[in-house]
Image: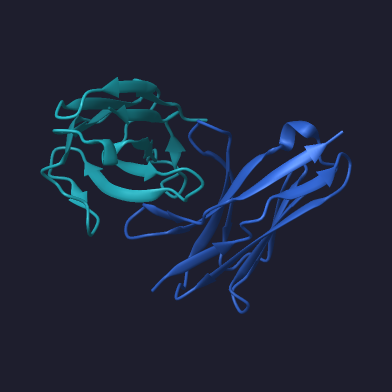
Chain colours: A blue, B cyan
Amino acid sequence: SQKIEQNSEALNIQEGKTATLTCNYTNYSPAYLQWYRQDPGRGPVFLLLIRENEKEKRKERLKVTFDTTLKQSLFHITASQPADSATYLCALPNSGYALNFGKGTSLLVTP
Amino acid sequence: GAVVSQHPSRVICKSGTSVKIECRSLDFQATTMFWYRQFPKQSLMLMATSNEGSKATYEQGVEKDKFLINHASLTLSTLTVTSAHPEDSSFYICSAGDRASKNIQYFGAGTRLSVL
């Protein structure tokens, strides 16, 4: 069956450091992969989409890599800030335009 | 970016009653909307795909008679939880993709349903 695995343990880092989150998947051949941010009690917010033919994508302090051989995506936040504290979700396409989500990794950035 | 409005944000109801949740795309037309359910510390689970003008497509294990979906217009989809029971208590979230960026989902703020 298809699986999306994200590190279930919370990631605690100090402000200013780079946070790196991992998303591994099995039994998928996705055309793209997405990352979302979710704050407690809120719906997810889209951050980045990376396509299968793209190795890396950047948006401001965010960087995503996509290795279809390893079946892995890495999500980096550079110069992290306390406001970056949230749960980050990895998502892969389901049938049509629906998405399958990982459980997410909780990030806590401390001053 | 596109805005999706979901209402109500929180509802508490008695067991056996029905609850309707609305999902609106405010500044774009959505031929397809999606309904997800999320339990604490769990991932979002797709319940159904809501198609404008036609029947919804339900994921395996989701009872279509329990979770009624109506998508009567290009900007509104509703989810009705019929005869709600405590085990239906959860966080329900809708999403939609606009035609320009079909791969990106814009999510509502979610509805916290508590069935007593």
Q: Could you tell whether B29 is left or right of A55 in the image?
A: left
Kindly tell me whether residue B31 is visible in this rendering: no
The residue closer to the viewer here, A53 or A33, is: A33
B109 with respect to A25 (left or right): left
- Residue B43, image x, y percentages: 47, 51
**Placement of the N terminus of chain A among the 4 image quadrants:** bottom left
Q: Quadrant of residue B86?
A: top left
Q: Measuring 66% from the left and 55% from the top, which residue is drawn there? A: A9
Q: Residue furthest bottom?
A: A69
| Left or right: A62 in relation to A80 | left
What percent of the width, then of the height, locates residue B95? 38, 38
Question: In which image quadrant can residue A109 be found?
Answer: top right
Q: Examine the rendered structure and indicate whether residue B57 appears above or below residue A6.
A: above
Residue A63: give x, y in percent of width and height. Answer: 73, 52
Tell me which residue sits at (51%, 39%) in the image.
A44
B15, A25: nearer the viewer? B15
The residue sitting at 51% across, 56% down in the picture is A102
Q: Which quadrant holds the C terminus of chain A?
A: top right
Name the side, left or right, on which A58 lies relative to B10. right
Residue A73 position, x and y percent, is 64, 64
Identify the residue shown where x is 48% and y is 65%: A31
Q: How many marks?
A: 0
Residue B83 appears in the figure: yes
Which residue, as the protein is rendered here, is positioned at the far front?
Answer: B116
